[in-house]
Every structure is written in structure tokens, then in C-alpha cells.
Amino acid sequence: MRAISSFPDPEQPATGRIPPEVEVGLYRNMLRVRNAEETLAALYREKEMRTPTHFGVGQEGVAVGVCEALLPGDVVYTHHRCHTHYLAKGGSLLGLVAELYGREDGCSRGRGGSVHLTDRSVGLMGSSPILGQGVALAVGSALAFKMDGASTVAVSFFGEGTCDEGVVYESFNYASVNKLPVLLVCENNFYATESPLETRQPSGTRLCDRARAFQISAEKVDGNDVAAVYEAAQRALARIRAGEGPQFLECETYRWLEHVGPMFDHELARTYRTREEVEAWMQRCPVKRAGHRLLARGLATQAGLDEWRREVVDEMTAVVAQAKASPWPDPSTLFENVY
């Protein structure tokens, strides 16, 4: 495996002192997100979903860990690999599934597809495939919150490939100068589409150091350890709410499937990463690791884990049927909300 695929070396691992109810909630939320992604990836092969789709299988720990630490009023902006954040923030499962099927019950009424999810009722302000846009928008929301004297925090999820965009550093600078309440969450999965980090950035690059150059506190965490992500997000959010300005989290993680689509790269004979590399990361599955921790702490039994899985499978089965029965958008509404 390439050096970039070495497993995370977090600056501060999980303490293991998370309250039992939170630990259980983290696991169950991740299980729900994982099942939704795997089910949608399987259904995508039927070719009824006519939207380019970027699945986040393997990266659930980052979304769930961060969103569990947020308050209900906090807002989130995200990118093209957005299903995990949408669900972790409380977005409607039906809204997600129906949106991928292009139906009226979709969260964007069937008009946005996979990469344009929104549910403002839970603070999911929107997703966009334009790299860096979400960072700038989150900083804008943070500016508004500060001007209003609110304690609300804006969050931006983005991949490490976004750190190649100039708007990111303009946003970092502005947020730092004005001590804005924004949490910057970098999901470092080592690849921008099929380009590895080592070919895009100078040798020895440390993403946290890039944030620190703007006097932004930064921390690297094992993104496949949901407890570590949750605790790191709590620390960062506490500093933000104390008026210390923007915070940066680099969460090292790994996507299992191809960049866009439901397949494994080896199924398509792609060579930019090896099957052995992917399978090594799959052994560090965030869902399985969280489940093992529950068993070790005596917070669940294997029978309990199995029952929770049956629950999310049953929920997803019912939602898929409901989404497929949802009406298509009325053609007469084609130009509504178009500016």
C-alpha cells in the first residue's frame, strides 16, 4: 500500500468516557446511515435512479460523530458525497430516497438529485458538488450569526481535495480575522476522484498546518473512530462557543466504493488504488469498531446489535417502497423556484 494509505495517527484518541446513551446513539445512527447507503448502492444498479451518485460507505463515522455533537439550531453545509451528513443531521430518510428516484417527495422535490440535498428544518442548508462553495457559505452564515449575537455554529464538511481550492484559504482567513463561529471539517480520504493526495500536494504536507497558518486551531482525528470524532467535535465546538473563532478538524477516513457510482473500483478494473488497500481499510470499518466497543463496555449484546440492524433494514425497506410510489413532479411546476 502507498504511504498515504497508512492508518491514521490521531493527535488525541478517544478517551472512552462518552456517556453510555451517547455511545449507543452513535452506533445506531451509523448503522442507519450505513444501511441506507448500502441499500441505495444496490438499488442504483437497477438504473431507476438517474442521478450521478457519490456514496459515503466507509465514511459514516465523520458525519455521525460531528453531527451528534451539534445543537439542533446549528447549520451544516456539505459537498457531493452528502448522504451521510444529510441523515446524520436528521434529514428525512424518505426525502433522501425519493430525491434519488426523482420523485415529488424528495427533499428537493425530485429536482436536485443526489448532490443537491437540503432540509432546513433540521439545519441541513444544502449540498453542492462545487468544491469550496460550502466552506464559503458556512463562513457567511457564521458571520450572520456573529452579527446577530447568536450562539449558533455553522459547519462545513469538505474533502481534502477541496484544500486545493483558493476560496478555502480566503474563507479561512476571513473567518480567522473575524473570529467567526464556524467548524471546518475536512474528510481526508486521500483521493480527489482518482488522484492521490501525494500527487497533488507537496511531500510532507499537513492539512492541519495549513489551517494553523491562519491562526485557526486544528486537530487531526481518526475519522473511522466515531467516538474520537465526537469528542474532538465537542472540544472544537466548546472553543467556538467560547468566542475563540473557527476550528479545523482533519478526519482521516476512506471511501469504499468508486468516486461516483455503486461499484467497487476492482469490479471495473481501475488501477489508481489496489483492492488490497481498500480491503485493509474495510477492516477498520467504523460501524464494526463502534459495535465492538459497545460489546466490550457491556452496553449491548450481540442479540441487541442484530435487532437494531433488523430495525434499520425494515425501515429502509418500507421507505424504498414509499419512495417508488411517490408521484413524479408535475411538469407544470418545471420553472418554479428557478431564478
Image (spheres, rainbow, N blue to C red):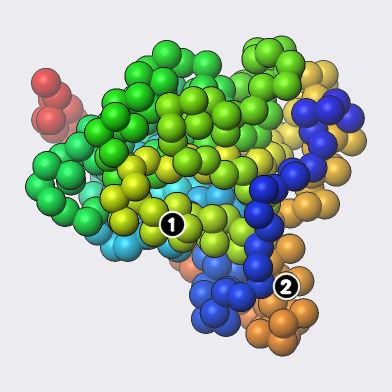
Q: Position of residue 135 (x, y in %)?
A: 37, 30
* Vertical arrangement, residue 291 with respect to residue 335, above or below: below
Which is more toward the observer, 196 or 144?
144
* Vertical arrangement, residue 56 with respect to residue 212, above or below: below
Residue 201 sits in quarter: top right
Q: Position of residue 83 (x, y in %)?
A: 47, 45
Q: Position of residue 263 (x, y in %)?
A: 69, 34
Is residue 299 visible from the viewing direction of this image?
yes
Residue 69 sits in quarter: bottom left
Residue at coordinates 49% horizontally, 25% vertically from top-left?
A: 213
Residue 301 as seen in the image, left or right of residue 338: right
Q: Earlier in the sequence, mark 1 or mark 2?
A: 1
Residue 200 as seen in the image, left or right of residue 170: right
Residue at coordinates 57% horizontally, 29% vertically from top-left?
A: 209
Residue type, mark 1 in image: Cys
Q: Quadrant of the N terminus?
A: top right
SS type, badge 1: helix
